[in-house]
Image: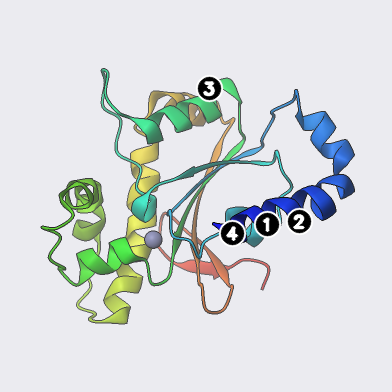
Amino acid sequence: MQDLTEGVARFRRDVFPAKAELFAHLADTHRPTTLFISCSDARVVPELITQGEPGELFVVRAVGNLVPAYTPGPGPHGVAAGIEYAVAVLGVSDIVVCGHSACGAMTALAEGHDLSGAPTVDAWLRHADASRARATTVESGANAVDALVRQNVLAQLANLATHPSVARALAAHTVTLHGWVYDIGTGAVEELDPATGRGTVLAA
Ligand code: ZN
C-alpha cells in the first residue's frame, strides 16, 4: 500500500501538472472514442499498450475478457452495463476485445484446472463455453492456451453483437469491432480477422 501512496504523490507532483490543461478539460467532458474490453490481468495495461491519453479509452475489465451474451431483465450485469453506456450514451466508434498471452482464465480452461475452490470463477468461465467449442485444435500445452485465447476473443466479439446497443450501432455502421491479442513477453499486438481467425501484427 505504501507503494501506491508514493505513486499517488508522484502523480500529483510530476504527472498531473504536466497535463493540467487536459485534466481541466476532462473535468466536465467525457467523450472516449473506444470501448476497450480486456482481462483483469495486472500485466495488461490498456492505456500503456495503446499510449492512450486520459479520456480516450472507456475500459471494461473482466476475468478472461469475457463478454456474456445479452440476457434481458435485471441482474448483476456489470459488463453489459459498461457496454451499453459506452455505445448508447457515450457513442464510441470502436470496440476492442483484447485477449492476452498466458491468460490464467484461458489456461485453466485449456488445461482443465480444478476450480472447486473458486466456484464463482468456475461459473463465470462458462461464458467461454463457445470459445472452447471453437478451439477444436489438437494442440496441447502452451499452443492449446494460445489457440483458446484467440478463439475466445472471436467468441466474445460474437457475444458483443448480441447486445442491442451494439447490434443497433453495427446496423447503423457507427461502430467497428476489433479483436486483439496482446503478447506480454514481446509487447506485440495482433488484430484478428473474425472471418479467418488469422492474426496480423499491428504496427509491425
Ligand atoms: Zn487473462
Residue beneath label 4, please?
Answer: 2
Quote the CA–CA distance across marks 2 and 4.
Answer: 12 Å
Residue 56 left/right relative to 92? right
The answer to whether the residues at label 1 and label 2 have Cβ atoms under 8 Å apart is yes
Tell which tag, 4 or 3, sits nearer the viewer: 4
Q: Which of marks 4 and 1 is nearer the N terminus?
A: 4
**What is the x, y in percent for residue 26?**
77, 31
The answer to whether the residues at label 3 and label 1 have Cβ atoms under 8 Å apart is no
Residue beneath label 1, please?
Answer: 7
Q: Quadrant of residue 149 in the image?
A: bottom left
How many C-alpha atoms fall within 10 Å of the one at disc 2: few (<14), some, or many (≥20)?
few
Q: Is residue 58 above or below residue 76?
A: below
Residue beneath label 3, please?
Answer: 88
Q: Is residue 70 above or below residue 118?
A: above
Residue at horizontal 84%, vertical 38%? 22
Q: Would the CB of label 1 be found within 8 Å of ligand 1? A: no
Query: In the image, what residue type sits under mark 4?
Result: Gln
Check the picture and name the quadrant holding the N terminus. bottom right
Query: In the image, what residue type sits under mark 2?
Result: Arg
How many C-alpha atoms fall within 10 Å of the one at disc 1: few (<14), some, or many (≥20)?
few
Q: Which of marks 2 and 3 is nearer the N terminus?
A: 2
**What is the x, y in percent for residue 132?**
21, 59
Give the SS element for disc 4.
Answer: helix
Quote the CA–CA distance across marks 4 and 3.
Answer: 39 Å
Residue 154 visible to an observer of this rendering: no
How many C-alpha atoms fall within 10 Å of the one at disc 3: few (<14), some, or many (≥20)?
some
The answer to whether the residues at label 4 and label 1 have Cβ atoms under 8 Å apart is no
Residue at horizontal 44%, vertical 67%? 198
Query: In the image, what residue type sits under mark 1?
Result: Gly
Residue beneath label 2, please?
Answer: 10
Give the SS element for disc 2.
Answer: helix
Q: Residue 76 carries which label?
A: none
